[in-house]
Image: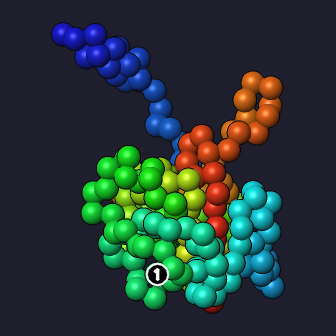
């Protein structure tokens, strides 16, 4: 018997006479108050997190201004490929190649207004996790119908079997002296383009 099997056997023995666990209440708040503008709330949170927010498809080119090479998922819509950059489709780009592009442009699966969180689950126009975490600048397109008020509304929109990336502003952390350090765990610059 392995140590693992022994530990599990002891746990089963200890729990054999235990009563069943009570049901966990799942009464999450699922909607915002009537009249709440979820787009404005999302923008407020994103700006608070130091993300740049743009409106309309034409703004994609503005968000990519100055970028010469932009990595994109292979299924990114052609109408989002705006600006003078070269769009490099990710068909298995190596980490070094991803690190060498000026920006990445993707879509998303959902955005949560209350927390200002943008969620990707490797679905349509989103690409794989490395694509969104390695380049230093991420431009993400959020359609109006992808914005929800609360997390409980967003979860059913995600593929639970797919790798997920949840973004709440540019990557940042604090060092031991509580100095903000950006770009440690992902892009240090985040631009969000909201399509109505």
- Look at the image and tell me whether residue 112 can be seen: no
Asked if residue 74 is positioned above or below residue 5 in the image, the reply reads below
Q: Which residue appears farthest toward the left when viewing the image?
A: 1
- Image check: 134 left or right of 36? left
Counting the numbered discs, the total is 1
Residue at 48%, 74% (x, y): give it: 85
Identify the element where label 1 is drawn.
loop
Q: Where is mark 1, residue-wise?
A: 81
| Rendered location of residue 109, percent (x, y) | 48, 70
Residue 60 in which image quadrant: bottom right
Residue at 46%, 88% (x, y): give it: 79
Quarter occupied by the N terminus: top left
Quarter occupied by the C terminus: bottom right
| Rendered location of residue 65, percent (x, y) | 61, 73
Residue 98 in which image quadrant: bottom left
Residue at 44%, 53% (x, y): give it: 100
Local crowd size for mark 1, using a 10 Å CA cut-off: few (<14), some (14–19), many (≥20): some
Viewer-proximal residue among 155 and 8? 155
Asked if residue 28 is positioned above or below residue 97 in the image, the reply reads below
Residue at 42%, 65% (x, y): give it: 71
Viewer-proximal residue among 168 and 89? 89
| Rendered location of residue 187, percent (x, y) | 58, 52
| Rendered location of residue 175, percent (x, y) | 72, 29
């Amino acid at each position: 018997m392995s140590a693992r099997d022994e530990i599990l056997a002891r746990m089963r023995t200890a729990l054999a006479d235990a009563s069943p666990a009570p049901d966990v209440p799942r009464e999450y708040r699922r909607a915002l108050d009537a009249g709440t503008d979820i787009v404005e709330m999302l923008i407020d949170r994103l700006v608070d997190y130091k993300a740049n927010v743009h409106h309309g498809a034409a703004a994609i080119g503005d968000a990519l201004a100055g970028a010469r090479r932009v990595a994109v998922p292979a299924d990114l819509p052609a109408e989002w490929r705006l600006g003078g950059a070269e769009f490099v489709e990710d068909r298995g780009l190596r980490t070094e190649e991803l690190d060498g592009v000026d920006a990445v442009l993707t879509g998303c699966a959902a955005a949560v207004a209350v927390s200002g969180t943008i969620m990707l689950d490797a679905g349509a126009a989103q690409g794989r996790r490395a694509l969104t975490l390695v380049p230093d600048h991420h431009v993400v397109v959020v359609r109006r119908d992808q914005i929800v008020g609360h997390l409980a509304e967003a979860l059913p929109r995600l593929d639970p079997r797919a790798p997920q990336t949840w973004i709440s502003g540019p990557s940042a952390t604090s060092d031991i002296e509580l100095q903000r350090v950006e770009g440690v765990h992902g892009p240090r610059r985040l631009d969000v383009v909201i399509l109505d």
